[in-house]
Image: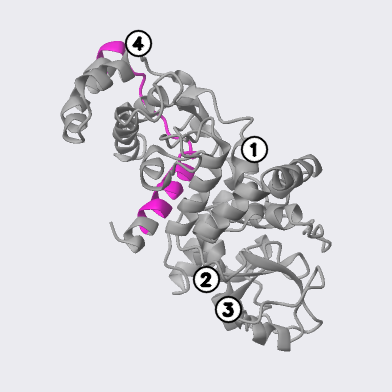
Amino acid sequence: MSPSRARSRTAALRLVLALAAIPVLAAPVGAGDFRAFVEELWPAAQARKVSRATFDAAFRGVTPDPGVLARLRRQGEFGRPVWEYLTGAVSAGRIARGRAEAARRAEALARIEAAYGVPGPVLLAFWGIESDFGASAGTVPVVRALATLAEARHRGELFRDELLAALEILEHHDVSPERMRGSWAGAMGQTQFLPSAYLRAAVDFDGDGRRDIWDSAPDALASIASFLHQAGWRRELPWGVAVALPAGFDLARYRGPFSDFARRGVRAIDGAPLPEAGEASLFLPGGAGGPAFLITANFEAIRAYNTSDSYALAVGHFSDRIAGGPPLAAPWPAGPRLDQAGLTALQRGLAARGHYDGPFDGRAGPKLREAVRRYQIAAGLPADGYATPALLEHLR
């Protein structure tokens, strides 16, 4: 598979996994139906060179998990304002543990960065958010979780494909069925990889002959770096820079070289100079007056891991704090915000005016930000890209 196709598939898989949070009603699964579903998988598993012994061992005693389907009603990072998500993801205690891990694993992190180009603080931020630095890697049997979702045909064929990928992992003997545990939706180990991401990106960095994202911190950290490298991470760029904007800054000119932003008076909040090379775009997740960031192509590499803007910003800001950067000083908005229904209405309204061409999913992201900016510029409004109830009313 080409790098571009790999990145597209990775992003699609993460997006669909995130979309699993939308409520979906599935019919109760009977034991006979479930066993019939499992047996129907055998030809596809065999085609992937999974042995009958591995297949039988994986499904021995496995039954549908009603708790998995019940979890579909949660929305995670997509259901909270970005500032609430950041508060939980980038806590003082987690920052302290991240800095301690940075000191403890400095040599390994340096070797991983040399191999893949991803800085150690970024890897530690992923590791901390995904599994609390390996302490909370998940307890749900992955085969059972994926089989439950696949039999219910949740999100079409996605979880069936992930289940088959999990069987391939078991065939390679990187982990036993009993040890293959993770989240309710099949994300595994300290990295919270889906099985297909594991097959593509996991690496054996400690040299023991197994790609062990469950019990090996070096393997987990290097596997995250491998994933980001495949997603297009550029070693010469930061993920982004937290900045302060000068008074009267023209928000309509929100893309360009770092050098252009510097000439226009934009300054990093930590006092460091902006990068001399590279392109960036202005990201105002709380609108004009709130925290401001210049984000790069590496922000999109983070979003390949999880498509939520809140998640990507949390990883970036957490990595800055681990590296000794300051907290965000600008206030977050205190007024009303659009819920999912309101965002969907905004997407439809912008689409009707030719500004938006994405899905009507009620979620903020790059496509909606760009559409909002185009509308704001056309309407003579401050082009901060921030979706608000007032903007929806203006559109109407």
Label 4 crowd bin: few (<14), some (14–19), many (20+), radius 10 Å: few
Residue that label 3 marks: 278
Secondary element type, mark 2:
helix
Q: Coloured how? A: one colour
Task: Work out whether residue 121 or residue 93 is closer to the camera in this orientation and state it.
Answer: 121
The image quarter containing residue 328 is: bottom right
Q: Is residue 278 visible?
A: yes
Residue at 36% across, 53% down: 9
The magenta span reads 8-33
Residue 61, numbered label: 4
Q: Which residue is mark 2?
A: 371
- Of the residues shown, which amino acid type is indicated by label 1? Phe
What distance separates the C-alpha of mark 1 from that of mark 4?
31 Å
Whichever of labels 2 and 1 marks the residue nearer the N terminus, that label is 1
Give x and y (percent) for residue 172: 31, 31
Is residue 306 visible to the viewer in this orientation of the structure?
no
Q: Secondary structure at mark 4?
A: loop
Q: Earlier in the sequence, mark 2 or mark 3?
A: 3
* Mark 1 vs mark 4: in front: 1
